[in-house]
Image (cartoon, grey):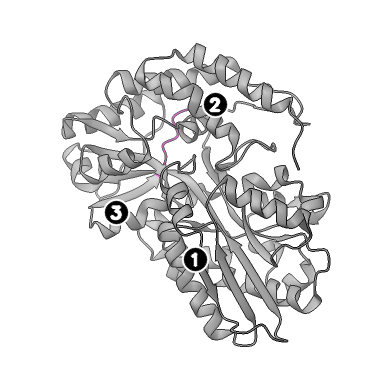
Amino acid sequence: MPPVPPSRPGRRAVLGGLLGALTLTGCGALSSKPRVREWNLFGGGDGARLLQIHQQYVAEHPGVAFQAHTLAWGPPFYTKLAMSAAGGRAPEVATMHMSRLKGFSPTTMLDPIPVELLAAAGVQQSDFLPATWDRCVIDGRLYAVPLDQHPFVLYYNLEICKKAGLLGPDNKIKPVKGVTPFLDMLRAVKETTGKYAVSVDTTSPWRLWWTLYGQLEGEFFSPDGKELVIDDAKALEALDLIAKLASEGLTPRSANYAALVAQFSNGEAGLSFNGEWEVTTYQTAKLPFSMAPFPVVYDVPKFQGDSHTFVLPHQARRNADDTKATIEYIAWMLKHSVEWAAGGHIPAYQPVVQSQEYLDLKPQAEYRSVAPNVFYDPDAWFSGSGAQLENESAAAFSGIATGQATPKSALAQFKAATQKLLDTPSPV
C-alpha cells in the first residue's frame, strides 16, 4: 500500500504514527483458545479497510484469540519487528513488504511457513503467479505468503483527457508506447489544463526512475549482490527524461507527495504517476478519473512495485495450535482479498483475481495486467519500501526537476551513497 512509500513520505509516515496505537482484539481475556497476534503497518484508507476485514474475521472465528496491532509505517515498524524476532518474543504473524524480505535475514529472523498447513487450509503454490511465489522461497523454504501487489500506475482525469483527445471509444485512455508518443500525450494534457500534464512526487522520484530504468533493462547489483553494477548510460537516459518533463513544465519543478495528490485532485494536472493506493481518495472526492498501466516508455514492460506479505516472525517457542490458527488466518485473508483490493492493491491470490467480483471492481481491475511485470526494488538490507536506498535516491535525484542538479551529478551522488551502504555490514 502502496504507497509515500518514502517512499510515501508524507502519507504513510504521518498516518502510521497517528495510528500506532490502533488495536483490534477478539479475545477478551486470553484463554486456552489458540492465539493469533498480528502486527501490521497500515494507516489511512488501508488501515480502515483492514480493520473492517478483521472485524469480519473475528466475528467468524470466535474460537481464536485474535489481536491486531497497527504500528508506525516504515523504519519504526521494521525496527520493532526485528527486535521482537531477535528476542524470540514476536507475534504469531506480521506484514512485511516483499522488497524487505531478503534484507531482513529471513533464515534467522523469521520462521518458515509450514506449507503442509497452508495446503490443509486450501492454499497452494499454484494459486500464485510463479514469479511472486518464487520470491518468497529462500534456501528452499517458504518464508512469506504474498497478499497483494501494488504497482506504479497511471491515473487519468476523464474529462481532461477527453478534451485532450486521449480517450478511445470505450472511454479509456489510449495506450502509448515509446518516448515520443509518451511526450505527445503529456503535451496534449498540459495544453488542456493550462498548468501541468502530470502530478508526480519530484522530491522522491525513486518509483518513476526505477520504472524507467527497469524498462531499459538496467542492472543494479551483480547476481551475488556484492557489487554495484548500475548502467550509467541507461540510468542517465531515464534521469534525462525526468529532467525534460520538468523543464518543459509537463511536471512541477518541485512537488512532494501531498502536492501530487492535490494537483491531480484539483485539475492542475490531468494525469498522475503514483502507486495505486490513492484510488479511495479520489473516489471519495468524486473525481472523474480512471486508471491504467503506466506507459511502456522504453523497451520492456516493467513497473516499480512491491507486495505486502504475511510472515511468521521468529518465536523461541512457537506453539503448534497457535501456528495452525495463524496459517488458517492467512488463508482466510487471501480468500477475502477482494475486499482488500477495493483499496487498489492487486490480489496475489489468483482465484480472487479471476473472480467476477474482482473483475467488476473499477477502476481497480483496469491495471491488473501489470502483475507479472512488477519490478521490485533491488535486494539488499538497505533497500525496499521506505528504506535508506529510496532516501538516498530522493536526496540525489530531487534536484534534477528543480534544475539544481544535473542528471550526471545526481547519478554520481546516488552511486557514491549506494556504494557506502553496500560497504556497510547488515545490522541483522
Q: Position of residue 208 (x, y in %)?
A: 46, 33
Circle 1 or circle 3, nearest the eye: 1
The span from disc 1 to disc 3 (Cα, nearest Å) is: 25 Å
| Residues shaded magenta | 293-299
**SS at circle 3:** helix
Tell me which residue sits at (64%, 61%) in the image: 94
The span from disc 2 to disc 3 (Cα, nearest Å) is: 31 Å
* Picture disc at residue 282: 3
Q: Earlier in the sequence, mark 1 or mark 2?
A: 1
Q: Quadrant of the C terminus?
A: top right
The answer to whether 428 appears left or right of 80 in the picture is: right
* Picture disc at residue 22: 1
Residue position marked by numbered label 2 in the rendering: 216
The answer to whether the residue labelled 1 contacts the one labelled 2, judged by CB atoms less than 8 Å apart, is: no
The answer to whether the residue labelled 1 contacts the one labelled 3, judged by CB atoms less than 8 Å apart, is: no
Q: Is residue 288 above or below residue 259?
A: below
Which residue is at the front of the view, 13 or 213?
Answer: 13
Circle 2 or circle 3, nearest the eye: 3
The span from disc 1 to disc 2 (Cα, nearest Å) is: 42 Å
**SS at circle 2:** loop
Tell me which residue sits at (24%, 56%) in the image: 285
Q: Earlier in the sequence, mark 1 or mark 3?
A: 1
Q: Is residue 259 above or below residue 396?
A: below
Q: Please say whether residue 186 is visible from this viewpoint.
A: yes
Q: Amino acid at mark 2?
A: Leu
Q: Amino acid at mark 3?
A: Tyr
Prevailing secondary structure of the magenta residues: loop
Q: Quadrant of residue 175?
A: top left
